[in-house]
Amino acid sequence: MSFLSRAAPVAACLTWAALAPIAEARPVSYPGGWTAMQMNNGDASSLHIHYSPTASDSIGFYAERNWAEDVQFTGLQYNRLLKRWNGPSSQANTYLKLGVGEADPFGDASGELSGFAAFAADWETRRWFTSYEARATDYAGNQSLRHSARVGVAPYIGDFGDLHTWLMLQVDNHPEAAEPTTTTPLIRFFKDVQMVEIGYTLETEELLANWIIRF
Amino acid sequence: MKLNKIAFGILALSVLTTPALADEMMDHSKMDHSAHEGAAPDLVDTKDVADSAQIVTAKVNGLVCDFCAQAVRKVFKKQDAVESVTVDLDNGQIVLGLKAGANMDDETIGKLIRKSGYSLVSIDRGDDA
């Protein structure tokens, strides 16, 4: 396979992502681990590539193309695992996410200092999953606050290396949006170090497609 | 616009499912594929632990998914004393196969498990009976 044919999908992906993000799963990896995650929904698409120097921190590049707010954000994101509770068959986490960078309103060449802050929490077993995230953004002076929550169930318990499947329901609240509250049934496929999610937002009839790879 | 967004989603999935790209990103050549080759379930690294000079089993809290298993595996595989790492999600434990002549004390094992992001409950070296 030629270099071009290999590079083309990467270039397309990066271009698209630069053109995104709400519920990022596990924003911190193992020490020395890299993670690439891409989130897409009706409002925005995002790309986040981060490195975890410890099991409690990660830092990396974050780009978001937000159609709902007509703005593109590019910057750095820092994620901090605030607290983890490890149980015999469960795990719960709270995270802080901070981003700083430049946001360019569509059609406007001048970027402005912008940023975001988010608090996220999750709890999961091998059967059940639930998460919540509150995210405040200031993109080029346009401030907004969003909430996102999920519940999920695994219809079967797979072994390591198997294809894991989760059925989830995501509820988003964005008071400034035309549809302030939306619900998105989605399916998550999880195998080894790769995760893919596909969903459909009922109120806005838009697709949700997310993926994560750890390496 | 809506169609564009759906097209973007399809593009993302196509990137993920492109074997050559996936191979390149995950550096498959460096991965241990033994877990997929007829091994017992739930095992991250199934290099035959019976060949190891010493087997250490650690009960660990917080192991609920493949990402967790990978984290533990990655951290322990970097240790010179470790020959194999097996993660048993069903029983919440990791089984370390140590190299001949090598040793790893309880304190080090606990430290590495915490470094991975998890909690050590107990260690069994199989010599308590």
Image (spheres, helix red, strand yellow):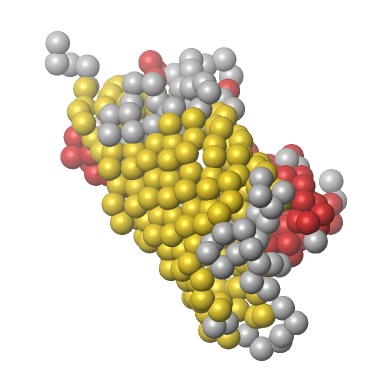
Instruction: Name the one closer to the observer, A124 or B83.
Output: A124
Instruction: Name the one closer to the observer, A66 or B17.
Output: A66
For residue A105, above or below residue B6: below
For residue A56, above or below residue A190: below
Percent across and percent down for residue B42 are: 46, 22
Instruction: Name the one closer to the observer, A64 or B67.
Output: A64
Q: Quadrant of the C terminus of chain B?
A: top left
Instruction: Name the one closer to the observer, B16 or A142.
Output: A142
For residue A43, above or below residue A142: above
Residue B34 falls in image quadrant: top right
Residue B57 falls in image quadrant: top left
Kindly identify the residue that appears in the image at 80 percent across and 61 percent down.
B1
Kindly identify the residue that appears in the image at 28 percent across and 38 percent down.
A86
In the image: residue A58, left or right of residue A18: left
Q: Is residue A88 visible?
A: yes
Percent across and percent down for residue A98 are: 43, 68
In the image: residue B66, left or right of residue A87: right
In the image: residue A53, left or right of residue A200: left
